Every structure is written in C-alpha cells, then in structure tokens.
C-alpha cells in the first residue's frame, strides 16, 4: 500500500459536501476529525489501512490516539460513507453513499486498487440462494481478488 497524500480539488469538495449532507440527514455529527479521516480515505488511490490512516493523521494532528481513528472509521461505516474490505483490512470510500447496500469489490493484487460494483443482480441472486437455505443474511460484501484491466494489459 502506498502512502496517503492530501489533495484538494473540486471532486474532493463535492464528495465532502455530499458526505456532510448524508450525515445531516441521518442525524450523525460529521466532526472535523471524522471529516479528516474521510478525506484521507477519499484521496487515497487505494484502500487505506487503519494504521496507515493513523500515521497520516498524526502528520497533521500530532498525538492522535488510535481509538480516535477507529471511532471515526466506525462512524463512517455506520453512515454508509465507506466500506471495509475484510480481506485487506482496509477501507475505501463508497461510490454511492447514502443508501445501505450490499456490494462487490474487484481487488487487484498487483496495484492494490479496489473497484466497487453495485450489481443488484448479484445481490439479488445471492438473496434468493440464502432464502432457499433458510439463511438470514445480515451483511454481504463480495471481494474478488485478481488483476485489474490496467495491470493485465501490462502482462506478467
Ligand atoms: Zn458502496
Ligand atoms: Zn491493477
């Protein structure tokens, strides 16, 4: 995983404004520390681990303790602003925040990028299979490891 750089830009501002609106609608407090963590994940070009986020945060706010980062991550997950990739122990920003959804991620083992799909037909057929098994699913996130088209084009 690469290091996290802070970037400013229209896209970042737009995403931050949207995240703030979602929190407001849900009654969640988008504090400056939570915004900060969200922005770090937003600006990273690949999924960010909690420790990596803590390090990046400490560069701006010296002395930040790990629970601060973990609490912020928990909040962002609750608000549906980020997803946790269990296989990488890392976090990515949700591409379609604001509604709770199941999802699928295509994770490149070479460059580390994770692409979010929100394919309802996959979720739908999984629901049907679960129902036929009498299984009550609470959370589903499919993580497919492989190689992205960009890395695939580069050859072995
Ligand atoms: Zn999402
Ligand atoms: Zn790749």
Image: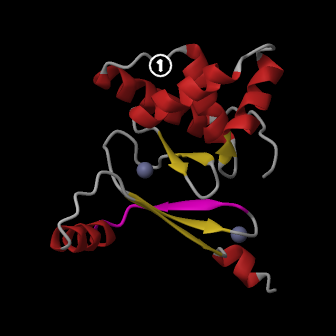
Q: Quadrant of residue 127?
A: bottom left
Residue 67, visible in the rendered structure: yes
131 lies above or below 40: below
Residue 101, image x, y percentages: 33, 51
Q: Secondary structure at mark 1?
A: loop
Q: Quadrant of residue 119?
A: bottom left
Residue 7, visible in the rendered structure: no
Q: Which residue is mark 1?
A: 30
The verdict on residue 113 being magenta is yes
27 lies above or below 102: above
Mark 1 crowd level (few <14, some 14–19, many ≥20, 10 Å Cα): many
For this rendering, which residue is in front, 43 or 89?
89
Q: Residue at x 55, y 25 (%)?
A: 72
Q: Residue furthest bottom?
A: 155
Residue 53, image x, y percentages: 71, 34
Q: Residue at x 36, y 29 (%)?
A: 22
Residue 122, image x, y percentages: 32, 71
Residue 66, image x, y percentages: 69, 24
Looking at the image, residue 11 sits to the left or right of residue 98; the answer is: right
The verdict on residue 43 being magenta is no
Q: Residue at x 67, y 34 (%)?
A: 40
For this rendering, which residue is in front, 107 or 15?
107
Looking at the image, residue 109 sits to the left or right of residue 71; the answer is: right
Looking at the image, residue 116 sits to the left or right of residue 80; the answer is: right
46 lies above or below 24: below
**Split into 4 quadrants, where in the image is the C terminus?**
bottom right
Q: How many marks?
A: 1
Q: Is mark 1 within 8 Å of ligand 1?
A: no
Q: Magenta stretch?
A: 112-120
Q: Residue at x 37, y 58 (%)?
A: 140
């Amino acid at each position: 995983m690469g290091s996290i750089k802070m970037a400013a830009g229209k896209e970042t501002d737009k995403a931050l404004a949207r995240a703030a609106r979602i929190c407001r609608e849900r009654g969640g407090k988008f504090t400056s520390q939570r915004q900060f963590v969200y922005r770090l994940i937003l600006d990273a070009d690949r999924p960010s681990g909690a420790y990596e986020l803590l390090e990046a945060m400490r560069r701006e706010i010296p002395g930040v303790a790990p629970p601060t980062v973990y609490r912020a991550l928990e909040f962002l997950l609750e608000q549906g602003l980020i997803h946790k990739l269990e296989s990488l122990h890392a976090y990515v920003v949700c591409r379609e925040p604001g509604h709770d959804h199941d999802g699928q991620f295509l994770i490149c083992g070479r460059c580390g990028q994770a692409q979010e799909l929100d394919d309802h037909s996959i979720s739908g057929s999984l629901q049907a299979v679960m129902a036929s098994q009498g299984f009550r699913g609470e959370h589903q996130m499919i993580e497919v490891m492989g190689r992205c088209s960009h890395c695939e084009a580069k050859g072995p």
